Image (cartoon, grey):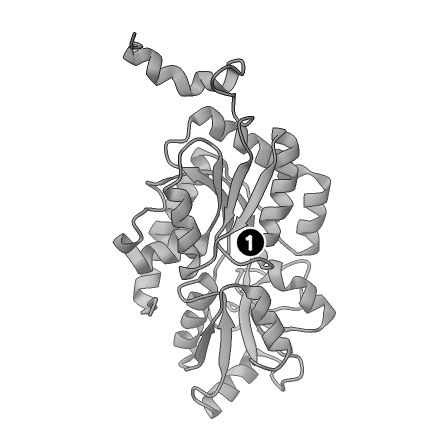
Amino acid sequence: MSLPRRTLMAAPAAWLAAPAVAQAPWPQAQPIRFVVPFAPGGTTDFIARLLTAEMARSLGQSIVVENRPGAGATLGTGQVARAAPDGYTLLLSVISSMVVGQVLRGETLGWHAERDFAHVAMVMSTPYLILVRPDLPIRSVEDLVREARRRPDGLSYGSSGIGSMPHLFMVRFLQAAGLTMTHVPYRGSAQIVTDVQAGVLPMMVDSLTAASANIRAGTLRPLAQSWPERVPAFPDIPTFRELGFGDLVVDGWSGIAAPARTPRPILERLAQATREALAAPEVARRYAETATAPGRHFLDDAQRYVRDELEAWTPIIRASGATVE
């Protein structure tokens, strides 16, 4: 006997509260897969593992972090876009894929940042920095500009991939300063730090969340950061804006997203678990240690935030001339 259409449409919401018979209520059926579109060891990996440990306690279900780097974070992002909308596959969404990748790669992605995702929450924001080896005689952006002009294309810098936000940020800086350098793309930031400290590269672009420990230890020297105001935890690092680069204001945000059409009750439960995770003492402590600002947008506000960021950045990215080649 077939069920009435109305009964079938109501089924997904009912599964959340129904007793465990044929269909276990979410999230009891299986572990939750949490995709991080970067290699282990970077900012996104750190944030994902910190938050999911707390979220797992709140949800009463294990969450398995999977690193799926590649193509400027669009590879792992696309895997989640194509996943079943059942609450068992989530994504650490990042500006590099949702905005930069969306604009630079367009229809070739096969997914859209707003249309194919249900954005659950924004979980963090952090500025980007240009960082150099401390043994170099480059102690300021002015020193860097002077050296780069003395040696056109003679300096190289590392970023977490072609089309990533660190890469795009450096492209904008070089255009604004009238400089040329050689870009060395990596699959994640951890190996870049190793190579910079070993003398393989003179400098890199990374987020403050990822670089804060090395800055405090003196193993990386920050020249400037991309927030509009100085960071209270690092008041000695100037902003690019105050150094005369008024357009170099960038917020490196990350969020949590699920495939589009994930049932609303599941999204609401995930949003609540994220709120609880962000408020947990250990998360607050680690955020403070890394000078990371917590996210403030959830569900519809998060969806709107991603849409607004995409609209705001599209003309800037296109005007920058950045490509994924």
Residue 7: name its quadrant.
top left
Q: Residue at x 31, y 53 (%)?
A: 109
Residue extending farthest to the left is 107
235 and 55: which is toward the camera: 55
Please indicate whether residue 33 sits to the left or right of residue 219 in the image. left
Residue marked by disc 1 = 44
Helix, strand or loop at disc 1?
helix
Residue 12 lies, with reference to residue 188, above or below; the image says above
Residue 27 is situated, as x and y percent measured from the top left of the image, at: 54, 27
Task: Give the quadrant of the C terminus.
Answer: bottom left
Image mark count: 1
Residue 199 lies, with reference to residue 230, above or below; the image says below
Please indicate whether residue 214 sits to the left or right of residue 192 in the image. right
Q: Which residue is drawn at 58% across and 36% down?
A: 274
Residue 235 is situated, as x and y percent measured from the top left of the image, at: 67, 64
How many other residues sit within 10 Å of disc 1, few (<14), some (14-19) or many (≥20)? many
Residue 232 is situated, as x and y percent measured from the top left of the image, at: 66, 58
Q: Please, what is the three-letter code of the amino acid marked with disc 1?
A: Thr
Residue 156 visible: yes
Residue 247 visible: no
Residue 217: name its quadrant.
bottom right
